[in-house]
Image: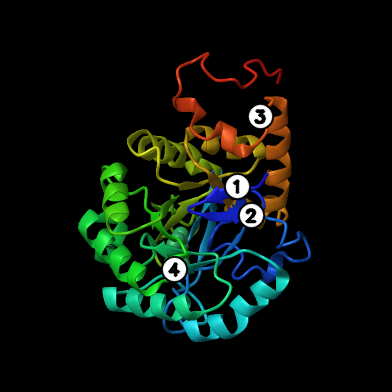
Amino acid sequence: MTVEVAGVRYPTPVMTASGCAAAGRELTPFLDLAAIGAVVTKSVMLDARSGRATPRMVETPSGMLNSIGLQGPGIDTFLADDLPWLVKQGAQPVVSIAGGSLGEYAELARRVGMAPGVAAVEVNISCPNVENRGLVFACDPFQAARVISATRRGIPKDIPVLAKLSPDVTDIVTVAEAVMEGGASGLSMVNTTLGLAIDPVTLRPALGGVTGGLSGPAIRPLALRCVWQVYAAMPEVPIIGIGGIRTGFDALEFLAAGASAVQVGTSTFHDPSSPARVADELRSELALRAAVSPREVVGVAHRPAGTSALRAEVSM
Ligand code: RRO
């Protein structure tokens, strides 16, 4: 089940998604952090933040909305407490960073780049819960590329920089091309999509922050479409698929569409063992199709019917 993404090896292709389990401590009663693909930590900013007004989460059909607003301890506390703890667990830490300006990303990169044990850096340029839409850098190819190159400069060459993209754009391929030109080593696709829910009693927005990021199975076809489009345009670019993955077959869909690995997020709220369980289920799904490794199915959905060596008939 080992996979390689942008030059780094992971024990399985199934990682945690940023934002759903902080730095992983809450998951330890439910799974072995060293045995899952990677722990992608909650996006951390330079300073500690309390986040947005409550309520911050609301259930929606087949998913949920969040409006956390980048709550976190700040980079110094993260690097002093959380990262060393993760390294001690034997986990592969993928550190997610988020800044409000180019300078902040550059400073975050400099500090994370000096810390020991970082497997990869995921650059969150797509948080939907920022003060204004102009700060969703991933919605503008030019700004997105600038953030990635400012970050890349601060990170040692052997540590990959993954750009986390937003699905809330007209043409995700243009953004993907821009960040790759800016120096990204690969892409994490996708972040949540902007949504809204109305409280049935007050008839006001259900979230304190009014709008929020929609996640869960409701967005899986949307995320899958994004992965498909980018793989079709740039098959050589490493992609980590994210969006509503809940089962091994969901993960397999993303691999077939072109992802080399996946992240599981919202599912952990009702089953905290999800990242390990999905990997186990994916192993069975691959065996069912006589695939010897996850690598064998990456992008297979793009090949003409009948040209793959995989077992064609699977009884469901
Ligand atoms: O903290 C958040 O509100 C948040 C972030 Br940073 C993100 O990238 N995506 C999201 O749905 N929420």
Q: Earlier in the sequence, mark 1 or mark 3?
A: 1
Whether the residues at callouts 1 and 3 have beta carbons within 8 Å, the answer is: no
Q: Tell me how far mark 4 sits from mark 3, CA to CA.
A: 47 Å
Q: Which residue is mark 3?
A: 291
Q: At numbered mark 2, what does the secondary structure look like: helix, strand or loop?
A: loop
Q: Which residue is mark 1?
A: 3
Whether the residues at callouts 1 and 2 have beta carbons within 8 Å, the answer is: yes
Q: Quadrant of residue 282?
A: top right
Badge 3: residue crowd in 10 Å (few <14, some 14–19, many ≥20): some
Q: Amino acid at mark 1?
A: Val
Q: At numbered mark 1, what does the secondary structure look like: helix, strand or loop?
A: strand
Whether the residues at callouts 4 and 2 have beta carbons within 8 Å, the answer is: no
Image location (x, y in percent) of residue 149: 29, 65
Residue name at image x 41 percent, y 71 percent: 155
Image location (x, y in percent) of residue 137: 29, 62
Q: Which residue is mark 2?
A: 37
Label 1 CB sits under 8 Å from any ligand 1 atom:
no
Viewer-side label of 1, 2: 1
Q: Is residue 283 visible?
A: yes
Q: Earlier in the sequence, mark 1 or mark 2?
A: 1
Residue name at image x 68 percent, y 55 percent: 36
Q: Amino acid at mark 2?
A: Gly
Viewer-side label of 4, 3: 3
Q: Quadrant of residue 77?
A: bottom right
Picture layout, residue 209 above or below residue 188: below
Q: Earlier in the sequence, mark 4 or mark 2?
A: 2
Q: Amino acid at mark 4?
A: Gly
Q: Quadrant of ligand 1?
A: bottom left
Q: Which residue is mark 4?
A: 208
